[in-house]
Image: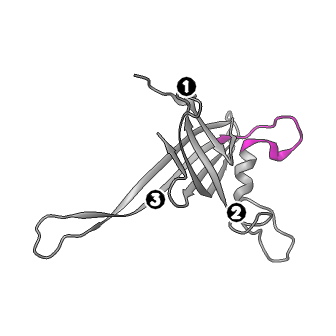
């Protein structure tokens, strides 16, 4: 019997491993409908919908290349935090620079179990929140929250 620790976990965004992820969490909730009728005394439930969401913490670093987009935190940050698009009085569109509908990203939450692909959940997500954290004595980090769009595309848990 094997137990897995954080050193066995990884996260991939658009197929690229995010090397500086400190942690990730994913949660799936199924909502139910009560189908009890007037002549029944006990509740009966039917599944109604499923919601998957999660978060992760990515450490910000500089690889020395001079390319701000070469680090993992910038990859996530640039999905949400964008500069003005040049139009006076307008903010940046979430789709700015992307094809329509490409606000979604492919995210794979993986546990390396020694097999070729490991155990994982892969899903399309929208990055819903990015919180930048800078504290004395701590590494600059980005806390990222995401919301799943539809059913997971692959599950191998």
Check disc 2 and report the residue beneath it: 102
* Label 2, residues with CA under 10 Å away: few <14, some 14-19, many ≥20: few
Secondary element at tag 2: loop
User: x, y percentage for residue 59?
Assistant: 68, 39
Residue 68 vs residue 36: left or right? right
Residue 29 vs residue 129: left or right? left
At 62% from the left edge and 40% from the top edge, which residue is drawn?
Answer: 11
User: x, y percentage for residue 80?
Assistant: 70, 59
User: x, y percentage for residue 146?
Assistant: 58, 55
Number of callouts? 3
Q: Is the N terminus in the top left, top right, bottom left or bottom right quadrant?
A: top left
Residues in magenta, as a range: 58-72
Check disc 3 and report the residue beneath it: 51
Residue 71 is covered by the magenta coloring: yes
Q: Which one is closest to the eye, mark 1 or mark 2?
A: 1
Q: Are marks 2 and 3 in contact (CB under 8 Å)?
A: no
């Amino acid at each position: 019997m094997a137990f897995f620790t954080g050193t066995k976990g990884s996260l991939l965004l658009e197929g690229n491993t995010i090397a500086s992820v400190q942690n990730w969490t994913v949660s799936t909730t199924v909502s139910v409908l009560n189908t009890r009728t007037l002549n029944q005394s006990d509740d009966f439930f039917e599944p109604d919908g499923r919601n998957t969401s999660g978060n992760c913490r990515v450490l910000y670093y500089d690889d020395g290349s001079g390319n701000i987009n070469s680090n993992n935190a910038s990859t996530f940050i640039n999905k949400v935090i964008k500069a003005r698009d040049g139009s006076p009085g307008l903010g940046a569109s979430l789709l700015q620079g992307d094809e329509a509908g490409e606000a979604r990203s492919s995210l794979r939450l993986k546990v390396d179990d020694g097999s070729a692909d490991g155990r994982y959940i892969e899903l399309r997500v929208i990055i819903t929140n990015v919180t930048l954290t800078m504290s004395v004595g701590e590494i600059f980090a980005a806390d990222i929250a995401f919301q799943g769009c539809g059913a997971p595309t692959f599950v191998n848990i």
